[in-house]
Image (cartoon, rainbow, N blue to C red):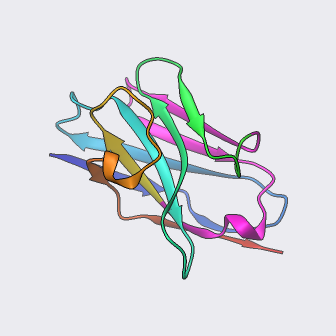
Amino acid sequence: QVQLTESGGGLVQAGESLTLSCEASGVTSGIRIMAWFRQAPGKEREFVAASRWTINRTNYADSVQGRFTIIGDYVKNTVTLQMDNLTSEDSAIYYCAAAGQFALPTRITAYDYWGQGTQVTVSS
């Protein structure tokens, strides 16, 4: 089993930056990709970004491309999400996810493990 623990959420103003972290623990040897999803009130959970854990390959949602950066660290068992130029549209609960496949899927069902989520609120 894999446990994922997110941290770093909070309240910021529009235009500011925030960094989220996710630490994986347990049996992590099978993890190949780590990702971030988010869910705003009344909306479905959506893909944000994904990263291969051992090589530099990433995938981003169009809505965050150029503003968010995902970095996976295989040695530290962590993945971070650097979020810049935040807007109120980025307000949501952000979830860390992990999977054992090599692709960088955007669908929720492709991921095997999930964290509990961390709240990000951007005030305009």
Note whether residue 92 is visible: yes
Q: Which residues are magenta?
A: 66-94
What residue appears at the point 25 percent right and 42 percent down from the top-left corner?
25
Image vertical order of residue 44 relative to residue 49, above or below: below
Instruction: Name which residue lies at 21% across and 30% down.
Output: 30
Most foreground residue, 79 or 104: 104
Q: Is residue 40 left or right of residue 107?
A: right
Residue 24 is situated, as x and y percent measured from the top left of the image, at: 32, 42
Task: Relative to 89, say whether 26 is above or below.
Answer: above
The number of discs equals 0
Looking at the image, is 64 positioned above or below residue 102?
Answer: below
In the rendered view, does 93 fall on the left or right side of 107? Answer: right
Residue 72 in the magenta stretch? The answer is: yes
Identify the residue at horizontal 50%, vertical 38% (top origin). 50
Question: Would residue 120 be visible to someone looking at this image?
Answer: no
Q: Give the quadrant of residue 124.
A: bottom right
Query: Where's residue 20, x and y in %?
Result: 55, 51
Q: Nearer the viewer, residue 89 or 8?
A: 89
Q: Which residue sits at x=34%, y=43%?
A: 98
Residue that protrudes farthest toward the top in the picture = 55
> Is residue 59 a member of the stretch shown in magenta?
no
